[in-house]
Image (spheres, grey):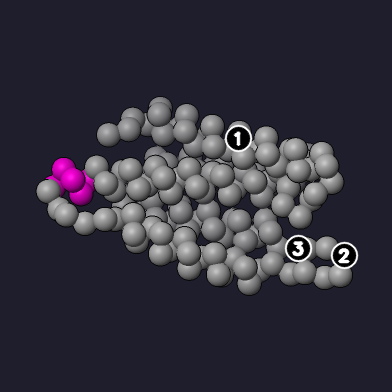
Amino acid sequence: MIDNIQIAIRLITGAILGGLVGLEREKHNKKTAGFRTHIIVCLGSTLIMLTSLYLFELYVARGVQVDPARLAAGVITGIGFLGAGTIIRSRVSITGLTTAASLWVVSGIGLAVGCGFYMAACITTVIVLMALHVLRKINI
């Protein structure tokens, strides 16, 4: 099993890498999917992969022949449609991308909590809250 330090390292690395892409987008004035949105999407993907690994180890140890990742894939696909409903396009701007991304990542948090992967879910929640709240206050 992956230890808690490795979980934290992977989640933080996902947030940093997603943030770097978001900074680049912001730098070039492509703000429809900016810094915070990229952090949340990358972090959500990291969490889903960690959750899939965790579930695989959990079920293989019990000798069960199932593919728990299929459930996660279905949830992520479904939440994508929900998130798409929060995106609003007007003539000159698009709004709702950060909301769509946050909906998507909280579905990952829910999957993690549902399988007992509490540490990853808690770390992800803290990072998302920081991305949404703190980064808005410092106007990044």
The residue at the point 70 percent across, 42 percent down is 22
Q: Main secondary structure of the magenta part?
A: helix
Circle number at residue 92: 2
- The answer to whether 19 appears left or right of 71 in the picture is right
Three-letter amino acid code at disc 2?
Val
- Rounded to the nearest angstrom, the CA distance separating label 3 from label 2 is 10 Å
Residue 66, percent from left and from top? 21, 56
- The answer to whether 138 appears left or right of 52 in the picture is right
Q: Which residues are magenta?
A: 58-62
The residue at the point 72 percent across, 52 percent down is 33
Q: Which residue is mark 1?
A: 17
The residue at the point 67 percent across, 35 percent down is 20
Assign a secondary structure to mark 3: strand
- Rounded to the nearest angstrom, the CA distance separating label 2 from label 1 is 29 Å
Q: Earlier in the sequence, mark 3 or mark 1?
A: 1
Q: Which residue is mark 3?
A: 95
Q: Nearer the viewer, residue 114 or 101?
A: 101
Residue 81 part of the magenta segment:
no
Q: Is residue 134 visible?
A: no
103 over 88 or under it: above or below? above
Residue 4, percent from left and from top? 37, 31
- Rounded to the nearest angstrom, the CA distance separating label 3 from label 1 is 23 Å
Three-letter amino acid code at disc 3?
Thr
Which quarter of the figure is the C terminus placed in? Answer: top right
Q: Are marks 3 and 1 in contact (CB under 8 Å)?
A: no
Farthest residue toward the right?
92
Residue 1, percent from left and from top? 27, 34
Q: Is residue 52 visible?
A: yes
The residue at the point 66 percent across, 68 percent down is 86
Q: Earlier in the sequence, mark 2 or mark 1?
A: 1
Assign a secondary structure to mark 2: loop
Three-letter amino acid code at disc 1?
Leu
